[in-house]
Image (cartoon, helix red, strand yellow):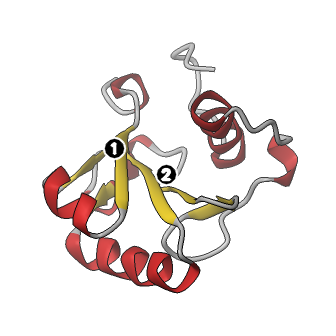
Amino acid sequence: MLTGEALPSYSALAANLLYTTAGASVGADTVETQNGDGLFHSDDENDYYLLYKPDLEWLRSNAAILNLERAERIRDVSRETGRKAIVYAAGNYIGQRELTRMGIIFCQLPDALHER
């Protein structure tokens, strides 16, 4: 997937991340963002978020970084659903201790996606 020739589509990357981290096999054609914060899948225990666009300029921008405002919105959804949030992004501006208090697990996207 990360051959350096082209960035993967949102759906392909989301499906791959879901499979590698949760063992859930879903077709890339069935995965799409469900809200403005990147929610793309939910199971009994977790909500999965991906902050990503297949655009190098966007991936290098602050829009690709998990910030406090977005984390608070994700936290609020997690409190409503009773599930933890797993967020994949190019980076974050919040320490893991604070994210843990918010019920969020942060996973950094591979640098190979945005450091070309």
The residue that mark 2 highlights is: 52
Looking at the picture, how far across and down is residue 64, in whole percent?
Answer: 35, 55
Quarter of the image with the C terminus is: top left
Horizontal side of residue 70 vs 14, given as left or right: left
Horizontal side of residue 54 vs 71, given as left or right: right
Residue 69, image quadrant? bottom left
Looking at the picture, how far across and down is residue 38, in whole percent?
Answer: 54, 64
In this view of the protein, can residue 105 be seen by the observer? Answer: yes
Mark 2 or mark 1, which is nearer the start of the sequence? Answer: 2
Q: Is residue 32 above or below residue 107?
A: below
Helix, strand or loop at label 1? It is loop
Q: Is residue 39 above or below residue 89?
A: below
Q: Which amino acid does label 1 sit on?
A: Ala
Task: Name the residue rendered at 29%, 60% in the picture.
Answer: 66
Task: Name the residue rendered at 55%, 19% in the picture.
Answer: 2
Q: What residue type is labelled 2?
A: Tyr
Task: Name the residue rendered at 57%, 18% in the picture.
Answer: 5
